[in-house]
Image (cartoon, helix red, strand yellow):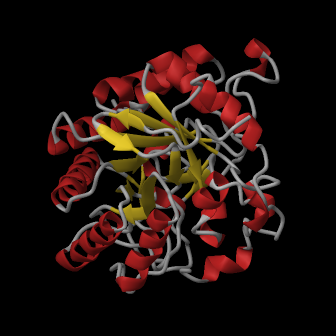
Amino acid sequence: MTDDILFSPITLKGLTLPNRIVMAPMTRGMTEQGIPGAANAQYYRRRAEGGVGLILTEGTVVDRPASRNMPGIPFFHGQAALTGWQAVAKAVHQAGGLIGPQLWHTGSTRMPDWEPDAPVESPSGLVGPDEPRGNVMTEEDIADTVAAFASAAADAKRLGFDTLELHGAHGYLIDQFFWSGTNKRTDAYGGATIAERARFAAEVVSAVRTAVGPDFPLILRVSQWKQQDYQARLAQSPEKMTQWLMPLVEAGVDILHCSQRRFWEPEFPEIDGTGGMNFAGWAKKLTGAATISVGSVGLDSDFFAAFGGQGSGAAALDSLYQRLEREEFDLIAVGRALISDAQWPEKVRNDKRQELRGFNAADLAILA
């Protein structure tokens, strides 16, 4: 297979990307008092210079108490932080790149030994099934959180970002509403079905869409797995997946960023076999939305093993090209490979794979 498809342009919601490569959001936790500075701006700029089609920033929190789960996570509220993010966007644009912030609230996943008296909030005061942590959100808390996401989104557009992503995956706040293991509510934000539990996310999306207007591209990251439970599944069938994702697309999501541990694995092999469509493929088929796939691109093993020093090179690229060629999904996000090698896209494009550095866990300690 050739890599022509990987480096072909695409236009989604009026946003023209030079290629199909997205820099996946990756927590770095290296901001001073939550305010991005020159080092953060140059970190993202280098990825734009290296050929990334669209950069999505690390998770950056909305204006709610205890919305971040550990020190060093950047804010996306307050004048100092917003000024810092404006400089980040400017640096990326000067390098010819495109960028969007990832907006999040980490819910009850906050490290319990960090500021233990902080008012942690979640749908039902749980961090996992039968695992209490934090306060049950009131309806007023929910309304204020929806408003906080909308305010951050309006700021993202005002500061000149090209798009934005809402983090609705990996067991953080929005995902805690989706998951029956952490959402035991009996009001309108809970329920026995995934469609009922998607109400909070749909309200966030709708409020954000109103804040940014009809033409600003809006991405939502979703996952079956949780950091609390890697085997968790919100949708056991295509029908359940439609009930989960379709209301979110109808509320205003343009692109679904479908996170799975290994992008080449089929989502429903019992339906289309071991070579069947992945999560992003099924999400696109069922909702009609554009999709980003992600999961261990450029790693020889899944990303959990990569933390132990395993993983390098450009594994499974042929599978990636095949899936892009058949339009299974539209974009592919690259994560840890880009931490260690800012030039990853250009090296792949120029057939210099022997020069790919591969992920090195030691690089997590620096902004290179």
The residue that appears at 38% across and 48% down in the rendered structure is: 166
Q: Is residue 217 left or right of residue 354?
A: left
Q: Is residue 301 left or right of residue 70?
A: right
Q: Is residue 314 left or right of residue 50?
A: right
**Rendered image quadrant of residue 237:** top right
The residue that appears at 56% across and 79% down in the rendered structure is: 113
Residue 80 coordinates in the image, percent (x, y)? 22, 80
Q: Look at the picture and state if 45 lies above or below 14.
A: below
Quarter of the image with the C terminus is: bottom right
In the image shown, does 132 or 293 lie closer to the viewer?
A: 293
Residue 14 coordinates in the image, percent (x, y)? 27, 36
The residue that appears at 27% across and 77% down in the rendered structure is: 84
Residue 153 coordinates in the image, percent (x, y)? 24, 52
Quarter of the image with the N terminus is: top right
**Rendered image quadrant of residue 60:** bottom left
Q: Look at the picture and state if 134 lies above or below 29.
A: above
Looking at the image, can residue 235 be seen? no
Looking at the image, can residue 52 be seen? yes
Residue 13 coordinates in the image, percent (x, y)? 30, 33
In the image shown, does 20 or 100 lie closer to the viewer?
A: 20
The residue that appears at 57% across and 68% down in the rendered structure is: 342
Q: How many marks?
A: 0
Q: Is residue 102 left or right of residue 293?
A: left
